[in-house]
Image (cartoon, coloured by chain):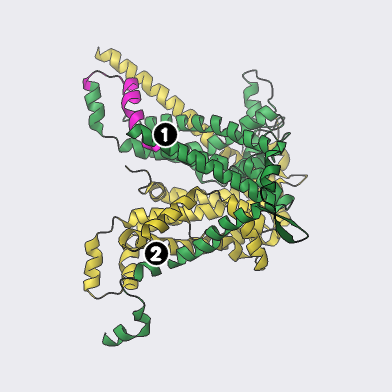
Chain colours: A green, B yellow
Amino acid sequence: MAKQATSPRRKWVTPKTVPYIFILPAVLLFIVFTLYPVISSLILSFQTSSGGVSSFAGLDNYRRLFNDPLFYRALSNTFIILIIQVPIMLTLAVILAVLMNSVLLKAKSFFRIAFFMPAITALVAYAIVFRMILDQNYGFVNYFISFVGIDPVPWLNDPFWAKVALIAAVTWRWTGYNMVIFLAGLQNISKDLYEAASIDGAGKIRQFFSITLPQLRPIFLFTFVLSTIGTLQLFDEPFILTQGGPNNSTLTISLYLYRAGFQNFDFNYASAIAYVLVIIIATLSWLQFKVAGDRDD
Amino acid sequence: MTNKNKGKQLLGKIGMYTLLFIGVIVSLFPFYWMFIGATNPSGAIFSIPPNLTPGGHFMENLRNLNESVGIWRVVGNSLFITLTFTILSVFICSMAGYAFAKFKFAGREFIFFMLLIAIMIPYHVTIIPLFRMMGSLDWINTYQAVILPNLAYPFAIFLMRQNMRSIPDSLLEAARVDGAGEFRIFFRVIIPTMRPALAAVAIFLFMFQWNNFLWPLVILGDPDMATIPVALSRLNGMSRIDYGQIMLGTTISTLPIMVFFLLLQKQFISGILGGSVKE
């Protein structure tokens, strides 16, 4: 015992240093692979390089970005998807969660697993499958709707429908995931609230709007922020489903960043795109927290 | 009165089940379509009316898939990368989570805050400097280039911290009184008692890395080094696509994780939620 206490191996493990030793690997990795790249990316965005030599270029990349119609295209596409997809998905998720939480429902875990299943698959795999299901001539969806007398829809070949397809794909993938988060929120709402409301004669619909929704507000904020961040980073789906087309109608910011960085190898310009994305995400997250926070007071 | 109520309840029930069953079909049909496709020749997948029955082309699709992307090598790459990543990351993130949950130290709040912010930073911001870094280390097309950057996964550290908070302090004190060193306590006391939480985080990390696409796509250009999603995207981009092959490929990428999930779904779902949405 005494020998161990004096051995050099033990000396630096004191109650004071122990927590630092425990976080050391994580912090080191974080500094090298996150913090350094984040800063380095910022520096790159203020530089240009030609022939392997980098030089300071001030705001040139950003100026170029704000005069780039394709960037505006990517920006507006991403926001259109965000504004339409997230509310649809969260509404569906809440409805499913409420049904799933109903005392009348049997086989709850079957439904829960079935709805969650899309969230565990590789984005690449489901995007490929969706591409086939949505094929204009041979896809299952067009075959199915032909029974109802609807003409084949050019899901992936028309600028409007390609966006619809992308939104449908993202919704398919993430609704169940959000449903599970809402379900956890629902289970934390006290039963007494509902009992008191039914004694007062409030119906189910009334209870949903005056108890369930207000009680779920923090969960809404949480899922809203997560979904916003996720949508702003949308890459895999448009990359596989449509390659950003047709006519750049599904070009997202992330896809544009990939094109600039890894197809044109313009790292400086791509870094500027990345930083605009950071600023947008930071602003939106801040706004969402602020809106929610103000209402709480 | 009660009869009317019962009728209403029955109607509500029918409506609820109809809605849920439509949802289930929408949710699961693409999987079914994929499995069917994996056993059919390319032509049978795109036929009118659609073919919804399994065929006998599984082995042939497998042979073709192996010829075009070397599927066994690719599966091996994915498995090696994902398992190594998961084991190391669980270890690193649980150590950090434990320190954040159970020790007071200068800088704790600040470092934790930085990690939380990192959750919000788009991954894309880091890929260009990371790509350059890997280039100068001569690590492009290597396993470590894929494994290392996400090991300190902030969300996993966050989940571990939330879960570690439930460890009673008396347990730690008892172990200290018994003369156990801090590392001994971590490995002999904390890790065993936290096994369910570790399992949940492990599944989460496993799924993340198995399905990870953008970074491996960027860093693994050599077809021999490709992971499953990267190989699939390459197949998808070919000018003449053999759909039987590609459906089998997507099946191979999905099935293991599906089985894994079905076995461990309770832990996985509670692990994702582990304290993240409370309050």
Which residues are the magenta region? A199-219
**Disc 2: CA contacts within 10 A as few (<14), some (14-19) or many (>=20):** many
Say the numbered circle drawn on residue B95: 2
Q: Which of A161 and A146 is in front in this view?
A: A161
Q: Which of B120 and A287 is in front in this view?
A: A287
Determine the residue positioned at 63% across, 41% down.
A253
Determine the residue positioned at 73% across, 39% down.
B43
Q: Nearer the viewer, residue A96 or B277?
A: B277
How far from the left and from the top, in percent, is residue A281? Answer: 53, 42
Q: Is mark 1 on a helix, strand or loop?
A: helix
How far from the left and from the top, in percent, is residue B32? Answer: 57, 39
Mark 2 vs mark 1, CA separation in Å: 36 Å
In the picture provided, is B61 more to the left or to the right than A174?
Answer: right
As drawn, A18 above or below A252? below
Mark 2: amino acid: Met
**Residue B61 seen from this side:** no
In the picture provided, is B210 more to the left or to the right than B220?
Answer: left
Say the numbered circle drawn on residue A291: 1
How far from the left and from the top, in percent, is residue B44? Answer: 70, 38
In the picture provided, is B169 more to the left or to the right than B151?
Answer: left
* Viewport quadrant of the C terminus of chain B: top left
Q: Quadrant of residue A235?
A: top right
Mark 1: amino acid: Val
